[in-house]
Each structure stands twice: as structure tokens, then as C-alpha cells.
Image: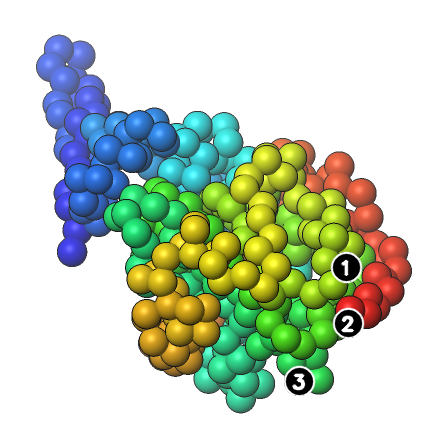
Amino acid sequence: MSVKVELATKEVFTAVQPVVERKMISVRPIPECLKRKAADELNEKEHALAGELELIKTWMRQSGHIRGRLEEQFLLGFLRSCKHSMERVKEKLDTYYTIRSVLPEVMRNRDPLDPFVRKVIKMGVTVPLPNTVQPDDPKIILIRGDAFDGDVCDFPDVLKVFTMIGDLLLRDDDHMMICGQAAIIDLGQSSSSHLFNFNLSFLRKASILNQQASPLRQKGFHFINTPKSFDIVLNIFKGLMTEKNRKRTIISHGSSLESLHRYFPPSVLPAELGGTLGPVQRFVDEWEQRLIDNRAYLIEEESLGVDEGRRRTTNPLAEEKDLFGTAGTFRKLEFD
């Protein structure tokens, strides 16, 4: 369902009388609580949306180097992420498509029906949860560390599925785009050593992809079932964060569900975390089907990016150190 937002623009066809042409855009209607939050926290003005979106589309068409989507609903997500700052939108869109162009191991071969990709999807490492306590609370994203089988796939494969899910949330979930997301990172009972055997250059690219380039705003990080010496992991985690994200809520709950429930009551959690939503596998299965249903959209994303030969502006990643090189790997970290 779409709501029509009108923008009146004047085009002078004679020297005497202006003629008004009405331009139409299609964006989804949102509940009143989200309208208030978007207005109060994101500087959103409904009457200005059509003009803002038209400016972004014109800029993208004239950029020369960006092969990107021009759908209003997609671009509205970037406006909300950047609190309707046009300069920040341009920078984020450029970074969004630039970093994707240098991560082929993540942004290529995204067919959810491919047997290997489907196997990674079925692991259920990234699981968006459906409920929040208040309708304008941040969306909850569950990251299950112990669901990551390092013998089956590598971290770039898991990140690929993460971005596939993120692409659909960006397009479809107004709650997420307005209220942001809170991550619950469940490290489970397995060793976390395989999570940190990365090429440093890739890890830096992944960090940029998920922070500077992503329009999905992070509101907090909650770790549960953390291993001994978790402070080592947390320091690496914080070192990869932007200064802005380091100021977000970052809490380690150890193995205490009681501590986690102070922030997330059982009504918004799966059974594995002491919640009443039922088994997490239910949501893993739902998202597997949702990715399959959007197969054409996800495959189309592979053709989008940047053509550096046609760029007329500064590459937003030009100052990033070691982005395109190979600076070694993290050693494996062993946890008891």
C-alpha cells in the first residue's frame, strides 16, 4: 500500500503565466507513533519528502559513476538514516555503493536458492525478531555466534547473508529505518576462536560496510553467553567501531538471562533466551522463505555499484588505510 505525496513545481512555458506541474511519489504510510519519532528525531517533514527525493535522484543520475536504485522508498531509508541531511545522504550513498564494489566475496553470488548460500542461510546466524516492547523501540536483531559453523563456511559467507537480510529490511521495514536496531549477540556454548581468524583488510572493509555505509542505524549491543577472557574480543570489537557507535550502549550480560531481561523482557525473545516467542528456528525458517521470495531483487543487487572510471568526485574511501591491501590476519583466539 502506498500513500501519495505531492510536490508542486512551477515550470514557465510562457513569459507571462506559470503552469503548475504536480509530481507524485509513492511511499508507504506509517503509524502516527513512527511519524512523531521521524519528525522529532530524524527531522522528517512530510511536505518536503518529494522535493528531497527528487534532489537525490537528480544527483545520482548526474553523478556519472553510481549504478544505484532510484526507488523513492529505498532512498527514503537513506534520508531517515542521515536525519534528512542532503550532504550526508550523498556521502552515505556513495560509500554504500563504493564499498560494495570492493567486496565481491560478499556482494556476488547472492542467489538464496544456490545450495551453498542456502546452507549458510539455514544456519540462522542473523535473525531479526518480530516484536518490541513499545512500538517505537529499536528493532531487535539476534546474532547467534554458535550457529556459525566455521567448518562449513567462512565469515564473508555469513556477512553475505547478513547483507541480504539487511537489503530487505532497508526496503521493507519502516520501523527499523526510523527506530534503528539493537543487537543481541549470543555467543552460545561453542568456542569463538574461528570468529577472529580474518584477513585484516577484509575485516576493515566489513566494518565500513556495516557502519559508515549502512543506513541501518545501530542503537546498542548486548552480549550474552560470553566466554572467559571476553574483554579481548570486546576490545577488538570496539576497535572496529566508529566513534559514534562506541558511544552506544554496549553491555556484556555474561551468562545471565536475568540481566538480559532487564533490557529485553521474555515477550520479545525466543525460547532459547528465556522468552515466550517460541523456538528461534521458527524465525530462521521464515527468513529463509522471505529471502527466496525476494530472489530476483537480491540477484539484481549484484549489478549495482560504482564505475570508478567515470567518477568526477573524490572516492569516499580514498583515505581509508589498508582498505585495498592485505595486512595479514588476526591470530586465532582460544577461549575456554
Q: Residue at x 58, y 48 (%)?
A: 251
Identify residue type, mark 3: Val
Left or right position of 235 against 326: left
Whether pointer 1 and pointer 2 mark residues with C-beta atoms closer than 8 Å, the reply is yes
Whether pointer 1 and pointer 3 mark residues with C-beta atoms closer than 8 Å, the reply is no
- Between marks 1 and 3, how big is the CA–CA gap? 26 Å
- Between marks 1 and 2, how big is the CA–CA gap? 9 Å
Dividing the picture into quadrants, the one containing residue 333 is: bottom right
On screen, residue 282 above or below 7: below
Q: Which residue is mark 1?
A: 229
Which circle marks residue 152 in the picture?
A: 3
Q: Residue at x 55, y 69 (%)?
A: 144
Q: Quadrant of the C terminus?
A: bottom right
Helix, strand or loop under label 1 = loop
Q: Quadrant of the N terminus?
A: bottom left
Q: Indicate the position of residue 316 as horizontal and vertical percent values.
A: 65, 38
Camera-side residue: 49 or 117? 117
On screen, residue 258 above or below 300: above
- Between marks 3 and 2, how big is the CA–CA gap? 22 Å
Q: Which residue is mark 2?
A: 336
Q: Earlier in the sequence, mark 1 or mark 2?
A: 1
Q: Indicate the position of residue 149 as horizontal and vertical percent values.
A: 65, 80
Left or right position of 235 against 255: right
- Please tell me how many numbered marks the rendered image carries: 3
Identify residue type, mark 1: Ser
* Disc 3 crowd, CA 10 A, few/some/many (<14, 14-19, 20+): few
